[in-house]
Image: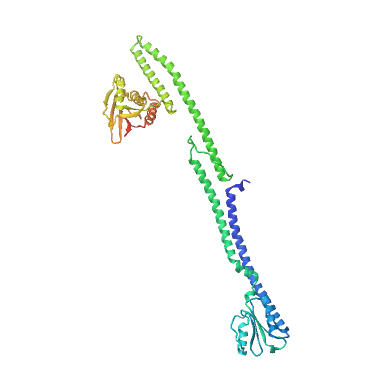
Amino acid sequence: MKFFRSLLAKYMLIILLAISIVQIAYLVIPLFVLGIAQDGQDDLSNRAEIESKVEGKWHAEAKGIKNVTEEEIVQHFESWKKQYPKASMFWVSEDGRLLTTLNVTEQLPSKWTPAFTTKFIKERYGGDPFTVIAFLGENESNGFIVFEITKEVFKPPIRNVYEKYGAFVFFGVIAIILFYIIVSFLFFRGIRKRLLHLQEAMEIRDVDGLPIETKVKKKDEIGQLEHSFNRMVCELRESKNREQKEEQLRRELIANLSHDLRTPLTKIRAQSYSISKEALSEDGQLAIKAMETSIVNIDALIENLMSYTLLTASKYKFEAKDINVIRFVREQMTTWYPVFEKEGFEIDIVLHPFEKNEWQVDPIWLGRIFDNLFQNILRHANSGKYIGVETESTEHYDAFIIKDQGNGMKNESNAKGAGIGLSIVDIMVKGMNLDWDIESSESGTKIKIKHYK
């Protein structure tokens, strides 16, 4: 039962229909030709029999006329006219005079000579029109009467029908061929239309960015494909919902861990500060200093982790405003200058004004970007003991450049982390419609924060 609902079954039906039409044509045409040929032979025998009967009847009735008068001959002609309206008849006397005529269209002589009579009989013998000549009565002195009719009258009805309706037969064959072409066209157009509809359903997206389900109208192969597509859409939707739930759980877990880790970290920081006030050996002081550095790094990592979670959830507060970025970066460097100076960095700051110093950015986000970049230099490029901050203006953009002379990002660092700091920089830069790029090698790293004009 499933097979008969398939496209293959419908296509096979069309092929069988085409083959059947061809086979029927091969069968019918020879039968029709044989039938016409047989009818032609039958027609010849039937026509000869009819002609013989007409000839015999004409002779018999002519011989039976006893009172040969013009009135009697006219009545005789009229009675035959009723049966054969297209026939022509005339009477020629013994001495060759043309006496009575009926439906005679050709020009006949009024006086028939033996030579003309012989010529007339010779021309009409076996020809068309069919001609019968009979003597009147028992005596040949009464002359003869002639009956003529076209042989077309003796054609069988089937031949007349063929000649009359032959055009209908031709156009009927054309109609059957056109019917097969139309059925094939509609079949394949229906398949194409359904495939295009399925393609449109694949390209349309709902608010979640997923394709929408399509309506299954039939249970054939395309219907099965549509059903599989709908099942795939349902699975994608379930997967997305499951992913969203897992993401929500992950964010909540990170937020809870960040909060829970801050409390013991604060206690450790307080205890390390208390220990640092005690009289310690040189090794003890170095250990306390290393502990404080680790505490600072862990605190920064927790802060970055929390910020990254909020940013990916689009819950990190964003308020853009026009600020003077040259002044803003100078203030940032003022805050970080003692930190780098304490670590023995060579600090190189060259900030030239831009053509337009006002950028529409969130100052908190921009400050976080510079903080993360400076922290990376302290943690990963400390060996170079160099930091440079400068401006660059081109035809297309203005930019801040932060440089160091560390070992580059491809080399391992003692403070290497998970890269969350740079991920936060990337999200915040793009969130403020800025751009950035990084050039890193073994001789150092250069980062550009670009603002396109």
**Is 353 drawn above or below residue 164 in the view shown?**
above
Which residue: 42% across, 17% down?
Answer: 265
Which residue: 48% across, 27% down?
Answer: 248
Within the image, what quadrant is residue 420 found in?
top left
Which residue: 55% across, 56% down?
Answer: 181
- Pick the residue in front: 245 or 395: 395
**Is 135 drawn above or below residue 392 in the view shown?**
below
Q: Where's the C terminus, which quadrant?
A: top left
- Pick the residue in front: 405 or 76: 76
Within the image, what quadrant is residue 29 found in?
bottom right
Which residue: 38% across, 31% down?
Answer: 430
Q: For residue 439, say whether it is visible.
A: no
The number of numbered discs placed on residues in the rendered structure image is 0
**Is 381 drawn above or below residue 103 in the view shown?**
above
Horizontal relation, residue 237 to residue 356: left or right: right
Rendered location of residue 310, percent (x, y): 43, 26
Rendered location of residue 250, percent (x, y): 47, 26
Q: For residue 145, say whether it is visible.
A: yes
Colour scheme: rainbow
Horizontal relation, residue 167 to residue 425: left or right: right
Outermost residue to the top: 279
Rendered location of residue 81, percent (x, y): 67, 77
Rendered location of residue 158, percent (x, y): 64, 69
Outermost residue to the front: 71
- Pick the residue in front: 62 or 74: 74
Within the image, what quadrant is residue 323 found in?
top left
